Image (tube, helix red, strand yellow):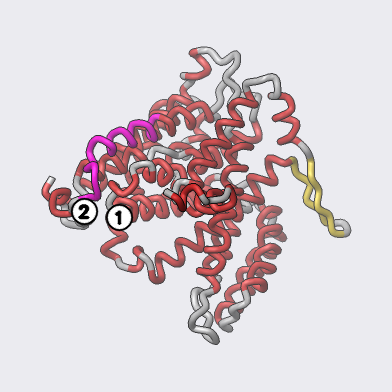
């Protein structure tokens, strides 16, 4: 108790920043502020802030974009870079390096993308414009989901956290593939060739066992600019760059360039990049929105896709994989744990907002619907119901492995 009293505000902030729930809490806080501003007398100021134009120019070459696109194309490239680093580490020496740990979350992630997309398509198949948003409910927000899970404390078995994280990684890979294939604009051959040349340089650097991350980041910056101009979404350059960062320094075995970068970026992304993205994209104006707007086919398809599609898809696909003998239920998890986790995966906030901005961003304000309403409602329902379900099902103390397995 005495130690608690002697803690300074700096100590408290430092502990909060290191906690599992910090990213999720800041994400929710930033989204809430955006919602308040968008529905108050400050709504015009909020819109003007996101519309402020920023330009970076070198000679005749320049990038001129409003603040919102700098956030969505620039900051989110850093987020995808971190996702790529985490994915490579997991595949090389983490949980995903063992094929036995890949099968169940991989199949679950597939179900969690297919079923929500089907639900959305069934509701919106008659509207060709609305069909552009079919991928919105396929995403899972790992920061938000882990933030909700952390509220249950030590009652959560480690295997559940690993399963959720692994599934979310596969979910992110699916989102990356979807963005690359379905949400790329008209391609610029010249810019695309520059991006491919950058990839070739990164490959050579990796084969030469260059361990200086600053060299890779410099080439990555050029690749990001080229990708931005090519018509392929710029955030994908972050994932590609991460694949070439060496996990080992052959001159210094105790140093890992990839793990060092991942460690340095994690707090920046969770405490800065993601909250700023949420603030810029979650400002849904509800004033003047009637029943028809809120329950328009697009937000309805997104909401049902996230809340129902995710839990049904993940649970059914995982159940089938286990019953067919392709995978086993993770140790210390039972069917109730699996189902509760499936519900939590319906929190699609960050990635759903991102895909929504790609699908409808150019037509913002001109459409009779706002897909973000469905994202907010679907994510809130999934978070609340998933938390309550796990709160009831998980034991009140640390999980008893034998008891959980017997349930």
Q: Residue furthest right?
A: 59
33 left or right of 85 in image:
right
98 left or right of 49 in image:
left
Residue at image coords 58%, 75%: 203
Q: Which residue position holds label 2?
A: 332
In three-dimensional space, the C-alpha distance between marks 2 and 1, rounded to whole angstroms, equals: 8 Å
Seen from the viewer's position, the closer of residues 384 and 329 is: 384
- Where disc 1 sits, the SS reads helix
| Occupied quadrant, residue 212 | bottom right
Q: Earlier in the sequence, mark 2 or mark 1?
A: 1
Residue neighbourhood size for the residue with mark 2, other residues' Cα within 10 Å, grouped as few (<14), some (14–19), many (≥20): some
Image coordinates of residue 90 in percent, x first then y, are 41, 64
Q: Residue furthest left?
A: 406
The reply to whether the magenta stretch includes residue 296 is no
Residue at image coords 51%, 26%: 373
Residue at image coords 16%, 56%: 325
Q: Which residue position holds label 1?
A: 158
The reply to whether the magenta stretch includes residue 395 is yes
Image coordinates of residue 222 in percent, x first then y, are 70, 64
Residue span colored magenta:
381-399
Circles 2, 1 touching at the beta carbon (< 8 Å): yes
Judge whether residue 53 can be spotted in this image. yes
Judge whether residue 321 can be spotted in this image. no
């Amino acid at each position: 108790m005495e130690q608690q009293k002697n803690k300074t505000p700096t100590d408290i902030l430092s502990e909060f920043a290191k906690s599992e729930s910090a990213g999720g809490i800041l994400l929710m806080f930033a989204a809430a502020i955006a919602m308040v501003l968008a529905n108050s007398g400050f709504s015009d100021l909020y819109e003007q802030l996101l519309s402020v134009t920023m330009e970076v120019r070198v000679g005749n070459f320049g990038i001129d974009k409003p603040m919102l696109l700098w956030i969505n194309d620039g900051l989110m490239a850093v987020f995808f870079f971190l996702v790529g680093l985490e994915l490579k580490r997991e595949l090389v020496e983490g949980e995903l390096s063992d094929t036995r740990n890949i099968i169940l979350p991989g199949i679950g992630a597939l179900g969690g993308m297919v079923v929500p997309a089907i639900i959305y398509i069934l509701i919106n198949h008659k509207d060709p414009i609305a069909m552009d948003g079919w991928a919105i409910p396929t995403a899972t927000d790992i920061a938000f989901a882990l933030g909700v899970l952390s509220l249950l404390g030590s009652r959560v078995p480690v295997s559940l956290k690993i399963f959720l994280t692994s599934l979310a990684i596969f979910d992110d890979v699916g989102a990356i593939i979807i963005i690359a294939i379905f949400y790329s604009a008209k391609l610029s051959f010249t810019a695309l060739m520059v991006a491919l040349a950058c990839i070739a340089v990164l490959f050579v650097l990796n084969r030469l066992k260059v361990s200086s991350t600053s060299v890779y980041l410099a080439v990555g910056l050029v690749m990001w600019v080229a990708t931005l101009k090519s018509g392929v979404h710029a955030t994908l350059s972050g994932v590609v760059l991460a694949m070439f960062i060496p996990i080992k320094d052959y001159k210094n075995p105790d140093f890992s360039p990839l793990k060092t970068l991942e460690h340095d970026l994690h707090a920046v992304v969770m405490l800065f990049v993601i909250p700023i993205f949420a603030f810029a994209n979650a400002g849904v104006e509800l004033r003047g929105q009637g029943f028809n707007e809120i329950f328009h086919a697009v937000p309805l398809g997104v909401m049902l896709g996230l809340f129902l599609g995710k839990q049904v898809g993940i649970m059914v696909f995982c159940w089938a994989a286990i019953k067919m003998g392709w995978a086993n239920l993770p140790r210390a998890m039972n069917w109730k744990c699996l189902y509760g986790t499936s519900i939590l995966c319906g929190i699609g906030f960050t990635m759903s907002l991102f895909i929504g901005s790609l699908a409808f961003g150019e037509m913002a304000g001109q459409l009779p619907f706002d897909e973000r309403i469905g994202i907010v409602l679907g994510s809130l329902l999934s978070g609340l119901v998933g938390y309550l379900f796990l709160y009831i099902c998980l034991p009140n103390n640390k999980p008893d492995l034998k008891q959980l397995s017997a349930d």
